[in-house]
Image (cartoon, rainbow, N blue to C red):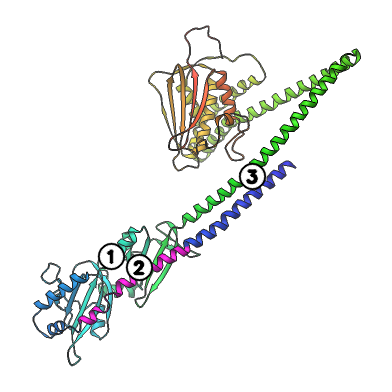
Amino acid sequence: MRLTLRALVVLTALGVILGVFLISLGFFRSEEQAKAEGRLSLYRSMVISEIERFSHLTYVLARDRHVMDTAAGRATDVLDRRLAAFAAESGLDAIYLMRPDGVTIAASNAGTPESFVGQDYGFRPYFQTALAGGQGRFYGIGATTGLPGYFIADPVRGPGGETLGVIAIKLDLTDLEETWRAAGEQVLLANRDGVVLLSSDPGWRYRALGTLDKEQRARIARDRQFPGQALAPLDWRPADNGRAVIGGAERLHLSGMLTPHGWVLHYFADDSAAVTRSWLLAGIVTTLAGGGLLASQVRRTRRIGAALRRSEAEEAQLREANERLAVEIEERRAAERRLARTQDELERASRLAALGQLAASVTHELGQPIAAMRNHLTAAEIGGQSEGRLAPRIAAIVDRMEGITRQLKFFARNDREEFGPVDLFAAVQAALALVEPNISRVAATVSVSAPDKPVTVRGNQLRIEQVLTNVLRNAIDAVEDRDVRRIEVRVALCDGAGRVEVRDTGHGLGQARLEDLQEPFVTTRESGRGMGLGLAISANIVRAHEGRISARDAEGGGAVFCIDIPQERDDAGASAA
């Protein structure tokens, strides 16, 4: 009944935590969605503003007297200087005038190595549109400079309305990319064919969001829009619920159309902060609930203490009554018989308690070699190891189990164990060999350092290996769910005692104390991962060796366990601990 009630309480608590997480996740993700929509609107406005702020310049220049005169056949030097001044003042890449056949006759960059003068741009769509009487617009890689730009063109007409030429400007939009990149955003601008024109990631530029058909590729090649570019597909995939996977990472995905070009601005936002904040809120709720439960337990403990004190007072009164009853011989004899029966019951209870402790110790101590044997057998089945290689390992583990059963006689006898010199480095190596399958399972990195001379202590070899095995297993379990899985073992000599220091990069001790962890059945592992006897047994073994075990949180994360055991003394008459 108690187990059912506890299970119901645990399930209810988990349900509440999950509910808080899901509700908060929906709220925080809606906040990230609204924030992303705002950023998309801002960047869309920036792009439109950048390409439209000079949209009327070609219309004005087409009606400039110097432009019209040069298009009609006058000398170009005056117009070259005038266009150069306009380009420098407005920050344009270039302003240039072309004849009706597409050949450039005047340009702001005339006289430079990258001059447009004499170049034929009759193949460009913006020139053909302007020559037909409209305003031409086009984005592509420059045929002369090899640099991308946005081109705007208008026809230059004579007094009779005849077309004398085409005036065009080239804008550099790459500053938008720098703005996106500096803000740490993931943004790309694609044309109506799905080819990326601008991007916060240079590796995305001139990639295709979809598959280009033969007609599209032929038109792009004819217009020389992206010369020398393979237009390979971009590593991205739209997902459900307004999300997309790009570069192997899932992101929130929003897009906006830019008319009349048919361009699409794509914005990718990392909303992992919403998950983190949701877990944080769930953790706060769990902490508050745990605090309430702890307060309830404190009040319950106080009530039990008061009841115990009342019980002690009643027991004192009972003793006084027994003393009065002792006056009568028959009553004293009856009391003695009752006392004898009580002593028999206590002895039976004591034997049952010892048997329970022995059973728990056997279960815990044999669990390590049995798990190691199972891991070796599984590894042999998977890796196809021969029986010849597996048999020595299984035999060593069986020897280890036999040694443990011999040790467990400690619970049934009072005589002292056989102590002798023990090489701490050899004990560390033996313990590491036993937990090797556990190390391989979590892919942990283990390093061992020891002085050149052996560090010899007085003790029982198997019991010391037992302590080291427990501490190493705790370290392996601590680093299992960490990004960095590293365990450092150091053997040293310190103040007349041999020391083994085990340092891990796990979650550390946190709020737990070593004194609490040394109590039987106290564990920091989740349910089903341990009985909480490892440190309790280890602490008893170290005390039996007149040693000391300590633990602390390591700088930078993790925990450090130190085991100090007195050195082997030269006098043969030293008594065993």
Q: Which residue corresponds to the image point at 50% horizontal and 65% vertical from the top-left? A: 241
Q: Single out the residue that lies furthest toward the bottom.
A: 160
Q: Are marks 2 and 1 in contact (CB under 8 Å)?
A: no
Numbered disc 1: secondary structure: helix
Query: Which residue is identified by label 3?
Result: 292
Taking the image as shown, residue 229 lies to the left or right of residue 443, namely left
Q: Nearer the viewer, mark 1 or mark 3?
A: 3
Q: Is residue 265 visible?
A: yes
Q: Please rate how many residues cluster around mark 3, counting C-alpha atoms within 10 Å: few if below 14, some from 14 to 19, many from 20.
A: few
- The quadrant in which the C terminus is found is top right
Query: Which residue is identified by label 2?
Result: 189
Numbered disc 3: secondary structure: helix
Instruction: Measure the alpha-carbon separation of dots 2 and 1.
Output: 11 Å
Instruction: Measure the alpha-carbon separation of dots 1 and 3.
Output: 58 Å
| Numbered label attached to residue 279 | none
Amino acid carrying label 2: it is: Leu
- The quadrant in which the N terminus is found is top right
Query: Which residue is identified by label 1?
Result: 174
- Where residue 199 sits: x, y (%)? 33, 63
Which numbered disc, 3 or 2, marks the residue that appears first in the sequence?
2
- Up the image or down, 44 lies above or below 524; here it is below
Which numbered disc, 1 or 3, marks the residue that appears first in the sequence?
1
Q: Which residue corresponds to the image point at 9% horizontal and 83% vertical from the top-left? A: 74
Taking the image as shown, residue 471 lies to the left or right of residue 228, namely right
Amino acid carrying label 1: it is: Thr
